[in-house]
Amino acid sequence: MKFGAIDIGSNGVRLLIARPLDLEILKPEWKKVEFTRLPLRLGDDVFSTKEISKKKSELLEKAIKAFALLMDIYNVDVCRACATSAMRDAKNSKELIKKIKKESGIEIEIISGNEESSLIMNSFIHLLPKKQTFLHVDVGGGSTELTLIQDNKPVIARSFNIGTVRIREKKIKTKDIADMHLWLKEHISWIPNLKGVGTGGNIHKICELANVSEFGFIKLKKLRELTEDIEAMDQHERVYHLKLNPDRAEVIDIAGRIYLDIFSETRVDEVMAPFQSLKDGIIQDLWEKHFNTL
């Protein structure tokens, strides 16, 4: 069987097609069949004007139609399309979703920040060391999701409208930052021996630059050093020396600062990088729903 996941984020739009390597277990390893990422940057419009512009709407329509064709070519059995922060905030998202459904047959779901975090965690939480407490931080273009994990189970979670694109567009509210710090102080900061888990394309890339393997740990000191090194580079150096995509190059240092802020506040000294994201969580969720019907 093949499963398709479409992740419509504030910075990029992604398609993942994958198949399970073992049909007998609930949490299999996955073979990536196809992965495509398009830097549509929906958040550029939404966080400034509260709407997705005509140009970006047309690009999203084309992207989803192309994804639908790819899934047809690869004989995908079932797919799910999820949209996050930018589409949550856009006033014209419902109209756009209706049009895309009519043109491509793909129905887009706008999911909450907590559901987004839950889906991401479901792709890796079973692989975390047991009897260890983790703070999971997922930084996106429009929002940051925080979840406390104890004994491989989520305990408490919260989503904040703090993201790389929002900050770059200077559309961040000081109240949101204050609220996040207060939440961390009340629920997380007092927990001893806390470890971090970081997900999202930016920390994935930072860990690659640090030669940290999947599910390896990056020390907070190293994360700080790399973030400062990237901040000192201009866009050209980030693209051509670090080999970053231009849209990633514009926000990776912002993401680094968000992770550093949160993990410093909670006295985390090292962060695990499972290299998972929403697309992987969607795939795993689709498989589990299928598996439970067997």
Image (cartoon, rainbow, N blue to C red):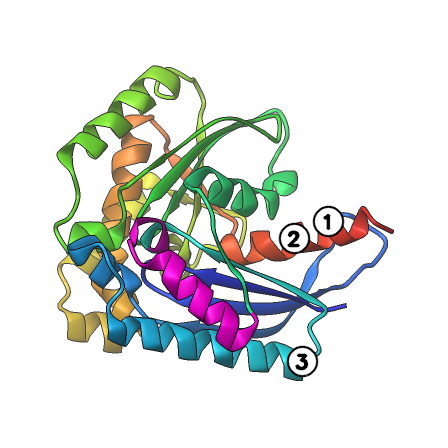
Quadrant in which the N terminus is drawn: bottom right
Q: Is residue 190 above or below residue 73?
A: above
Residue 88 position in % (x across, y down) = 36, 49
Crowd class of label 1 (few under 14; some 14 to 19; many from 20; radius 10 Å): some
Query: Mark 3 highlights which residue?
Result: 74
Which one is nearer the viewer's eye here, 41 or 193?
41
Q: Is residue 90 above or below residue 263?
A: below
Which one is nearer the viewer's eye here, 120 or 85?
85
**Any part of residue 66 in sight:** yes
In the rendered structure, which segment of residues is drawn in magenta? 87-105
Q: Are marks 2 and 1 in contact (CB under 8 Å)?
A: yes
In terms of secondary structure, where does tag 2 sit?
Answer: helix
The residue located at (73%, 49%) in the rendering is 289
Tag 2: amino acid: Gln
Query: Mark 1 highlights which residue?
Result: 288
First in residue order: circle 3 vs circle 1: 3
